[in-house]
Image (cartoon, rainbow, N blue to C red):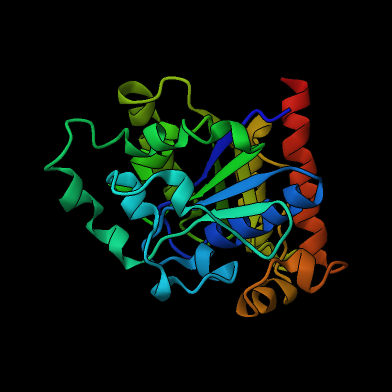
Amino acid sequence: MSMGKIISIANQKGGVGKTTTTINLGAALANLNKQVLIIDMDPQGNSSRGLGIDINALKNTLFEALINQKEINEVIKSTTYKGIDILPSNLKLANFGATISNTTNEPYKCLKDIISKIKKQYDYILIDCPPSLGLLTINALSASNSILIPVQCEYFAMEAIAQILGTISEVKRLHNPNLEIEGFVLTMYDTHTNLSNEIAQEVRSLFKENTFISVIPRNVSIPEATAKLMPVSEYRPTSAGSISYASLAKELLDHEQTK
């Protein structure tokens, strides 16, 4: 039974592990026999690249689907990994704001409109958001059931959280009253540093029920897998990085059971 749960992976701070989390959580869900679609909402196209797509050779991308030049089904590509499809992007997506403002009164609903056509084909749709809170991210949040927020265990983590929470309440007020917080995920966690432990404690004490128990450690297998353009579960299935994403995927499925 496909329910097509749509989750944005967002944090306007760069380098917190959004794309890494999107790809590796997607792969971990696929390993649990879920059908997963990853939507690359970032003009840099990193999650497309990370799943082996040559983004410069793409004729049709998310951009064409959003501006209704192409049907979404024509743009979705299967990857070499069982259970994972991708809706790829490249730098064309950076023109979305300028292009769409001339054609619609509802520029924030474009993604929601096109996803509605394919939602039933997938168990999970994960949206990799760009590191900003502009039109693209708001499209993603407007189309989503929930938002998963990777938090890097470092200085200024809490400021980033405050900003994203502000954006969430704006989006709820203006575009998507049902948007929920799926949870905060602590990334690049180093048990040996006081800072990692302090940030983790702070996030957990402020957002108890909204923080995933699974944490993503600093583990060399994760960047190595990224460099090889593959999920860590394919590259080093028994590594700490792979195990932590498998654990995150199970926890995500448990959320559905408990609801």
Number of marks in picture: 0
- The structure residue drawn at horizontal position 73% and vertical position 30%, both measured from the top left corner, is 255
Give the answer, above or below, for where 220 lies relative to 209.
below
Quadrant for the C terminus in the image: top right
Residue nearest the observer in this picture, 179 or 52: 52
The answer to whether residue 214 of the structure is visible from this angle is no
Q: Quadrant of the N terminus?
A: top right
Residue depicted at 72% across the width and 63% down the height = 217
Question: Height in image: 46 above or below 145?
Answer: below
> x%, y% of residue 81?
71, 61
Left or right of residue 19: residue 132: left
Up the image or down, 232 lies above or below 71; here it is below
Q: Position of residue 242 (x, y in %)?
A: 79, 63
Q: Is residue 108 left or right of residue 33?
A: left
> In terms of depth relative to the viewer, which is nearer, 160 or 90?
90
Query: Residue 105 lies in what quarter of the image?
Result: top left
